[in-house]
Amino acid sequence: MELHPDKFDLECTTVWSFPRRGKWATHKSDWRGNWAPEVVRNLILRYSKESDHLLDCMIGGGTTAIEAKILNRHITCIDVNEEALERTKKSLQFDVDNNAKQRIKKCDARKMDFIKNEEIDFVLTHPPYADIIKYSEGKIEEDLSSIHDIDTFCDEMEKVASELYRVLKKGKYCAILMGDTRRNKMYQPMAFKIMEKFLKQGFVLKEDIIKKQHNCKATGFWVNKSKDLNFLLIMHEHLFVFQKV
């Protein structure tokens, strides 16, 4: 098993594009909505060092956990979805020559009481974009991906921001990948609404990286819809890197 990509260069601009998604180690792309390992590897290498304690509070398909293990970072992985947690455990079933440890726990990111104040060296996570992809049929109080109203979703994400600020060490970084959507044909800047919630909690904005989306094919049906109804297809996401100062 190859534990590293054949070719990898650390990104040095605010526009990231990965047309071919990496599949080294146990990475898979079949968990809907998970982020690319290239994104995670860039973040970990740039904003943490070996033996740091990382946190992904919405671990999803386990991408962050895999990269943390390979790159010798300890990590706490949480999610409200049992399937995500079991998948993460399975994805970590490979050997590496380091002492990286993984803590996997079912928990709501809005209330991470088991994590101590300023315990974490680096946070990186890819939350759901409201209910664009629903990961369960749970109630709003149980699953953020069950929330349709954008303002309600952002208010709940502010609770996540508050917890992340609490558990993160001073001077350290928090990276969040968020996208936008449309409602009633109008563009909804959900990412910027989330950014405002994090700033309100005390974070400062280090970087706003534009990540091009390649898994949304601009062909056929949606191209015709775009032309017929006069709207543009959303093909980018915002990768915010915040700092606790």
Image (spheres, helix red, strand yellow):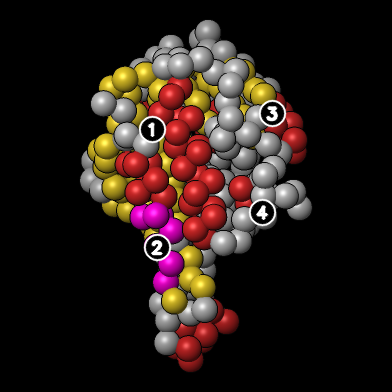
Q: Is residue 215 left or right of residue 9?
A: right
Q: Earlier in the sequence, mark 1 or mark 3?
A: 3
Which is nearer the eye, 233 or 122? 122
Pointer 4: residues within 10 angstroms few (<14), some, or many (20+)? many
Pointer 2: residues within 10 angstroms few (<14), some, or many (20+)? some
Residues rendered magenta in the picture: 187-193
Quarter of the image with the N terminus is top right
Q: Which mark is residue 146?
A: 4
Give how far apart the Cα atoms at labels 1 and 3 are: 21 Å
Q: Is residue 1 above or below residue 115?
A: below
Which SS class for mark 3? strand
Pointer 1: residues within 10 angstroms few (<14), some, or many (20+)? many
Q: Earlier in the sequence, mark 2 or mark 4?
A: 4
Residue at numbered disc 1:
174
Q: Report the amino acid beneath label 3.
A: Lys
Residue at numbered disc 2:
189
- Name the residue rendered at 31%, 48% in the picture: 209
Residue at numbered disc 3:
106
Q: Report the amino acid beneath label 1.
A: Cys
Q: Kindly check if marks 2 and 4 are in contact, taking CB atoms under 8 A apart as contact.
A: no
Q: Kindly check if marks 2 and 1 are in contact, taking CB atoms under 8 A apart as contact.
A: no
